[in-house]
Amino acid sequence: MDLGISGRKALVTGASRGMGKAAALTLARENVELTILARTPETLEATAAEIRELTGVRVTAVAGDITTPEGRQAALAACPTPDILVNNADGELPGDFRDWSRDDWLRGIDRMMLTPIDMMRLTLDGMMDRGFGRVVNIVSRSVKIAQVELGMSNAARSGLVGFVAGLARQTISRNVTINNVLPGIIASDGQRQHVEVLAQQSGRSFDDIWRERAAQNPAGRYGEPDEVGAYIAFLCSSKAGFVTAQNLLIDGGQYPGTF
């Protein structure tokens, strides 16, 4: 399928690895010009070089922390008029809310809620003026299936989803859509870190927990970052202009509800 976005410009945050990298690579294969941002320069540059080699598209790498004003300014200096924005950032590791300070909460809310909101604030008006825009927030299934060990993610990411529900209905008439992707168990670095913490807390082995989580999924496996990347690319396409304000699971059918 021709997604109709060849020549568009995309800004992808948290793009050096995992689902962010997969989204960037899939968009590049559609001949989308990329600006990618992450905190670790070496990993980011390696990802940029790999995408250039595989696709031949222009890739600008910006090393920075998107949760800071300076990081957001650097990203937009490199890509001032994005047609596509993919918001991706690490969540918080599993823990007990009794151990979290106010500063911990503010850090989590800033990372998982306020930063993507500010990136939309900085880009949506330009998209509407130009008559095309696609925003996809990589969130988590935790907004539909609250996970006991991820209380901060349950709260902060739900706040982002609630905000988008109102905002997306203000932009769609100008051909600007905003959607949230809710990944389940994806074989990413973040998932491995999650299981490592669960192993430390429980005293069980990493391999046992890893296999158990796969077995509990109806698909009997973990999803792959490339599968998430393909889903995101479609939502960014010209074909998805009537899809907005949606919270779209990609979880192997693990969410048990009908709706």
Image (cartoon, rainbow, N blue to C red):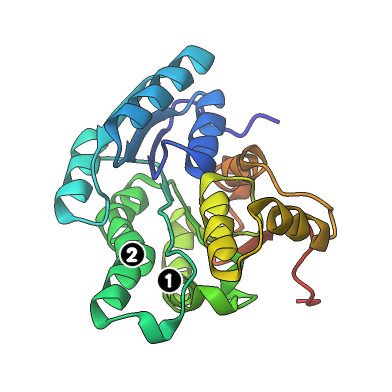
Dividing the picture into quarters, in which one does residue 105 lie?
bottom left
The residue indicated by pointer 1 is: 160
Label 1 neighbour load within 10 Å: few <14, some 14-19, many 20+: many
In the rendered structure, are the residues bearing label 1 and label 2 in contact, judged by CB atoms less than 8 Å apart?
yes
Q: Amino acid at mark 1?
A: Leu
116 relative to 232 in the view: left or right:
left
**For this rendering, which residue is in front, 43 or 96?**
96
x and y, in percent, of residue 206 in the image:
64, 53
**Image point 36% across, 53% down: which residue?**
128
**Image point 57% across, 50% down: which residue?**
192
**For this rendering, which residue is in front, 197 or 119?**
197
CA–CA distance between discs 1 and 2? Answer: 7 Å
100 relative to 174 in the view: left or right:
left
Tell me the quarter of the image containing the C terminus.
Answer: bottom right
**Does 119 appear above or below 109?**
above
**Does 209 appear above or below 152?**
above
x and y, in percent, of residue 251 in the image:
71, 58
**Does 141 appear above or below 235?**
below
Q: Label 2: state its secondary structure.
A: helix
The residue indicated by pointer 2 is: 117
**For this rendering, which residue is in front, 162 or 143?**
143
x and y, in percent, of residue 155 in the image:
45, 79
**Image point 30% across, 56% down: which residue?**
119
170 relative to 236 in the view: left or right:
left
**Does 182 appear above or below 222?**
below
Label 2 neighbour load within 10 Å: few <14, some 14-19, many 20+: some
**Image point 19% across, 55% down: which residue?**
68
**For this rendering, which residue is in front, 223 or 8?**
223
Residue 5 shows in the view: no
